């Protein structure tokens, strides 16, 4: 029978990182070897799933940000169906509600401590609409344009989401200049003033 | 002054070595850079409150969520959609949440070895309006207890329907169901 020759192999790694890992391993009652193993197993698992660890950590931070910024994560199909029902029952109320939600969220950025509230809002919006294949927000001087293409959006959700964006843009001090909305497609242009 | 770039040897199990080399090669990174990156990210995961093992579990949940079509919705909007104010019938909403739970349960039942624990972790990871999610399994019985100080009465009932739908797809039947504003107590048997 063939004897297994190698059970462990060594790699060169940065000493400062290993020292930090060693400290954590000790605090968690782990050996450094055990901790390093888990880290590698996690990396390989992530790789098999087609993502890297950075994506995982980004997801964790995204969830944290979503929680802090007033979003809830759930199944897209459920949100669409619920929106569809509400829109069919009372279009006006539903649109107003989404508009108000946009106002509320934007107000958080406007009154917060970020240097550029609109830029932060724009980046967060992109992160929190991971289900939207195309979302572009461009700001040039006094103008802002928003372009969304999302074939999965039903008509009701498209109009509701537009209302949400209008609420947010108005809170940032923009007035909607032109608006083109049809199922799954939104184009908005707004001017400061 | 610390010499940040000094190197030390780190030991890795032999059976992982080839895979590690393969992944680093595919990424076009040197092995040394790749190893340092793995360690740095493991440290970052730790700073976010995850051991590598917990991070791996979280990874599964997030991937499942993306595959299932997870999407963010403003919480205020969800509160409105869940409420009677939006004019949707209570039964209609409950059916939607139940069906969505069934779909979710079917997916995790086929994908994971322990779907009940995955469902619990999914609720913990994504429903940050829940302050407590407790699942007790005993032979053929499973008890769910979810607590929230934020959920409205309507939202509590709808979430309970979602859990019921998921558990029914996993192969359990509802034995007892009790919901109070912010509290879900469910018992299932196989």
Image (cartoon, coloured by chain):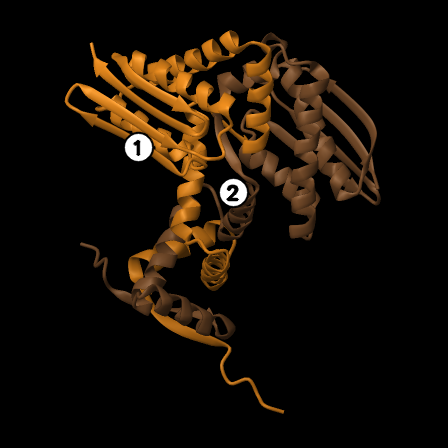
Residue on which the image places disc 1: A136
Between B99 and B176, the one lying in front of the other is B99
Residue A184, percent from left and from top: 44, 30
- In the figure, residue A15 lies in which quadrant? bottom left
Residue B15, percent from left and from top: 51, 73
The image's mark for residue B46 is none
Residue B59, percent from left and from top: 51, 48
Q: Residue at position x 41%, y 66% from top? A: B23
Residue A46, percent from left and from top: 47, 56
Mark 2 crowdedness (10 Å alpha carbons): few <14, some 14-19, many ≥20: some
- Tell whether A147 sits left or right of B129: left
Q: Chain of mark 2?
A: B
Q: Secondary structure at mark 2?
A: helix
Residue lying farthest to the left in this orientation: A141
Disc 2 vs disc 1: Cβ atoms closer than 8 Å?
Answer: no
What's the colour of chain B in the image? brown
Q: Quadrant of the N terminus of chain A?
A: bottom right
Residue B141 lies, with reference to residue A2, above or below; the image says above
Residue on which the image places disc 2: B66
Q: Residue at position x 40%, y 55% from top? A: A21
Q: Residue at position x 20%, y 20% from top? A: A143
Q: Which chain is orange?
A: A
- In the figure, residue A187 lies in which quadrant? top left
Between B188 and A25, the one lying in front of the other is B188
Q: Secondary structure at mark 1?
A: strand
């Amino acid at each position: 029978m063939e004897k297994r020759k190698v059970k462990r192999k060594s790699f060169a790694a940065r000493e400062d990182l290993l020292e930090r890992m060693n400290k954590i391993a000790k605090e968690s009652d782990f050996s450094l070897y055990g901790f390093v193993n888990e880290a590698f197993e996690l990396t390989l698992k992530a790789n098999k799933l087609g993502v890297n660890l950075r994506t995982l950590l980004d997801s964790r931070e995204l969830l944290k940000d979503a929680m802090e910024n007033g979003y809830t994560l759930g199944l897209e199909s459920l949100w669409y169906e619920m929106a569809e029902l509400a829109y069919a029952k009372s279009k006006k109320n539903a649109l107003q509600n989404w508009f108000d939600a946009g106002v509320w969220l934007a107000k958080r950025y406007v009154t917060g401590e970020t240097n550029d509230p609109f830029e932060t809002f724009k980046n967060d919006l992109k992160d929190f609409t991971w289900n939207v294949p195309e979302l572009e927000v461009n700001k040039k001087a006094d103008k802002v344009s928003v372009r969304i293409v999302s074939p999965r959006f039903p008509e009701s959700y498209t109009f509701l989401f537009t209302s949400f964006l209008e609420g947010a843009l108005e809170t940032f001090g923009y007035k909607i200049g032109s608006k083109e909305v049809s199922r799954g497609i939104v184009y908005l242009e707004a001017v400061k003033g | 002054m610390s010499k940040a770039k000094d190197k030390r040897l780190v030991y890795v199990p032999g059976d992982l070595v080839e895979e590690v080399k393969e992944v680093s090669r595919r990424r076009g990174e040197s092995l040394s850079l790749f190893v340092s990156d793995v360690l740095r990210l493991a440290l970052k995961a730790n700073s976010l409150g995850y051991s590598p093992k917990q991070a791996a579990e979280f990874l599964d949940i997030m991937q499942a969520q993306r595959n299932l079509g997870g999407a963010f919705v403003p919480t205020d909007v969800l509160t409105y959609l869940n409420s009677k104010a939006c004019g949707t019938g209570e039964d209609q909403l409950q059916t939607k949440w139940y069906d969505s739970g069934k779909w979710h349960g079917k997916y995790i039942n086929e994908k994971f070895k322990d779907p009940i624990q995955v469902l619990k972790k999914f609720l913990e990871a994504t429903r940050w309006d829940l302050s407590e999610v407790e699942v007790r399994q005993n032979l053929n019985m499973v008890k769910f207890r979810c607590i929230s100080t934020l959920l409205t009465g309507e939202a509590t009932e709808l979430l309970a329907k979602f859990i019921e739908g998921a558990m029914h797809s996993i192969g359990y039947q509802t034995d007892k169901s009790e919901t109070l504003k912010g509290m879900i107590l469910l018992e299932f048997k196989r």
